[in-house]
Image (cartoon, grey):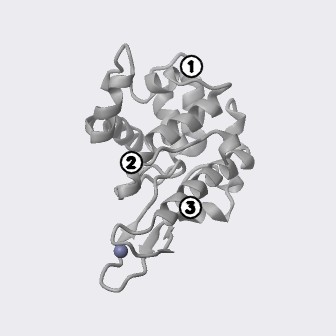
Amino acid sequence: MCHAFLTDARFYQFLFRIDQSIAEEVQAAGCRCGGVLHSACYPRKPRGFRSVLDKSYEYRLSFCCATEGCRRRTTPPSVRFLGRKVYLGVLVVLISALEGGVSPTRRRQLVDTLDVPAQTLWRWQQWWREVFAEGPWWRMERAQFIPPIAAKGLPGELLARLGGADLSERLVRLLGLIAPVTSTSRSSSLTVRTDPQNL
Ligand SMILES: [Zn+2]
């Protein structure tokens, strides 16, 4: 495996700690009705390197308002789960980014190892180009990138523009950057910090 961090349990624990810190902030802010948020996680069965994922990957952090008559659901942004996709966000980003890249062999190895169906790969591509690129978040953020990033260059070109010591750091940055699109709650305006010293 070329990308060693993908099979390192510590990488996934680090992502979980980021999700936890986002969730703490969201919970502290409370429900928009003023109510207290109680934990109400969604069960998940993410596909990826299952053997290195601990129990924290069996659920997505989420909250429910404790106030009778409100009970509104608040799901914080996540760097682990990219919307309702069954594969872990980091894999959806990396495999999509490697498409058309300089090393097709690496991508093929990853796709084969994880047994990602061709139809799924095609759906991811459509998602980046149509759902993500046309969504309100990217339409607002894309102006920050000069020269502009074309929809067909997502997410590879975006990944290439982000700083970081290595690929794993750039992936974490990207996941943190786009995390607001993984939440439909008010908290989607939250800026996600992914620097280790902030956790
Ligand atoms: Zn409420």
Say whether marks 2 and 1 touch (CB < 8 Å). Answer: no
Q: CA distance from mark 2 to mark 1?
A: 35 Å
Residue 188 x, y percent position in the rendering: 39, 51
Residue on which the image places disc 3: 24
- Ligand 1 contact, mark 1 (Cβ < 8 Å): no
Residue 45 x, y percent position in the rendering: 53, 62
Residue on which the image places disc 2: 189
Q: Earlier in the sequence, mark 1 or mark 3?
A: 3
Task: Give left or right: position of 7 versus 34.
Answer: right
Q: Is residue 190 above or below residue 34?
A: above
* Amino acid at circle 1: Ser
Q: CA distance from mark 2 to mark 3?
A: 15 Å
Toward the viewer: 142 or 83? 142
Q: Earlier in the sequence, mark 2 or mark 3?
A: 3
Residue on which the image places disc 1: 103
Name the residue located 73 percent from the left edge and 44 percent from the top edge: 8
